[in-house]
Amino acid sequence: MRSIFTIFSRGYTANKRFLICGHNPRKHRRPFSTTVVEDDRSPLSGTRVLDLTRIVAGPYCTMILGDLGAEILKIERPGSGDEARKWGPPFFEGTRESTYFASVNRNKKSVCIDLKRGRDVVCELARECDVLVENYVPGKLSSMGLGYDDIAEVAPRLIYCSLTGYGSQGPYASRSGYDVIAASLGGLLHITGPKDGPPCKVGVAMTDLATGLYAHGAIMAALLQRSRTNKGQWIQCNLLSTQIASLINIASNYLNGGKDATRLGSEHESIVPYEAFPTRDGYMTVGAGSDLQFVDLVKRLQLPELADDEKFQDNTARVEHRTELLRILRGTFEKKTNQEWSAVLEGATFPYGAVNSIREVFDDPHVKYTHLVQEVDHPITGKMKLVGPPVTYSYATNAVRSPPPVLGQHTEEVLRNILKYSDDKIENLMAQKIVAK
């Protein structure tokens, strides 16, 4: 029985010619349907992705696609690879394998190709893929003959996704994009940090991650649309637009209410109380988003009189009298430890939680119960722990299947099995340093 996932699957040309971008007279004759093994429940089984990304946003996107079963061909620079391979310390003990790189590159095959000199190899791989993802500065790949228009000539049904700092047009288009810069220009640093203190970056690259998530969703939508239109397309995602879109209520407050935002530490601009309260041995975060939750909170804090005070009778009043209310609540939370407060708040109608260190995160009994942390065998580091996919399905598979690849680990395999190159041809390309292991 033919699987429903064939709508995403690649096809193969009968004639394995060496292709050059922009010069392919048979470009519209390639079939795009293969049968997926029935017992493979990965949603993207049969989908192949040509991954030309580095660092975080792009690799995070392709890792998600790989978790869902897509075959990810990670194209890397011979000799050095993805820059994140060098980002450390920390490295895995006794190796130069970066823990940073490992965090966003599982379920991928590493193929080393010099993009300039190996352009034709990349074009031929593009014909065997459903999706191409890249995060170069706009114009860089086009200058090598690997831009969207070039690839569309040889692979008209390919989904081509570009992740950039600022988009392909506009005053900033030619700038390199990094998470913290986009977060700065996009307002996130302005609203992050202590009151009256300096701007702070978020502890992880949230703008990169959000852009990767947007790109992953866009690719999935484009694959679905291709199943109806039989056409590929160019998707453009960028860090700055993603960051501004992620301002949500803060942006709306300014655009529709004329209210600029300020740094509030862990406080919430529109909800009180909603922050991390200092305790005797740490911090306890509490969010009372409704009047009923506020009543429950003050009763548990043995401050029931606050519920009857007209200054705190609803959220609007509590926001107006924020300073007075928070002074009272902070003084109360400082009297007990996190563990003591956890016992007091057990069963509360409002959300709460201690501010955990990273060690405490992974020691948390609920986190252990979810089995989110998984272990794989790596050819150099040995046992490697990875935080697996956070999404579960009742039927589909979303899983860690292979460790992050060693640089060039799969070059020969991909050239031989996908492009059907002979051993002599592969050896010749390696001798010319067009490809590498």
Image (cartoon, rainbow, N blue to C red):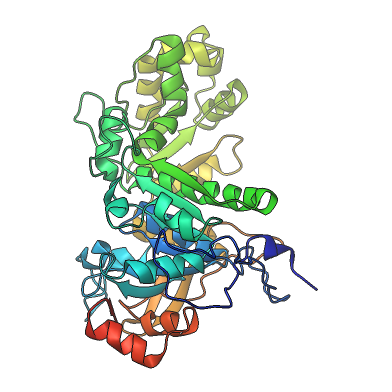
Residue at the far front in the pictured view: 25
Residue at 64% x, 51% y is: 224
Screen quadrant of the C terminus: bottom left
- 352 with respect to 280 (left or right): right
Q: Quadrant of residue 290?
A: top right
- 25 with respect to 264 (left or right): right
Viewer-nearest residue: 394 or 33? 33
- Percent x, y for residue 434? 26, 76
Screen quadrant of the N terminus: bottom right
Could you tell me if residue 161 is visible in this image? yes
Residue at the far right in the pictured view: 1
- Percent x, y for residue 402? 47, 76
- Percent x, y for residue 114? 26, 70
Residue at the far bottom in the pictured view: 424
- Percent x, y for residue 95? 22, 79
- 123 with respect to 118 (left or right): right
Q: Quadrant of residue 250?
A: top left
Could you tell me if residue 387 is visible in this image? no
Viewer-nearest residue: 24 or 191? 24
Total residue callouts = 0
Q: Is residue 208 above or below residue 289?
A: below
- 352 with respect to 395 (left or right): left
Viewer-nearest residue: 267 or 170? 170
Q: Quadrant of residue 411?
A: bottom left
Viewer-nearest residue: 61 or 319? 61
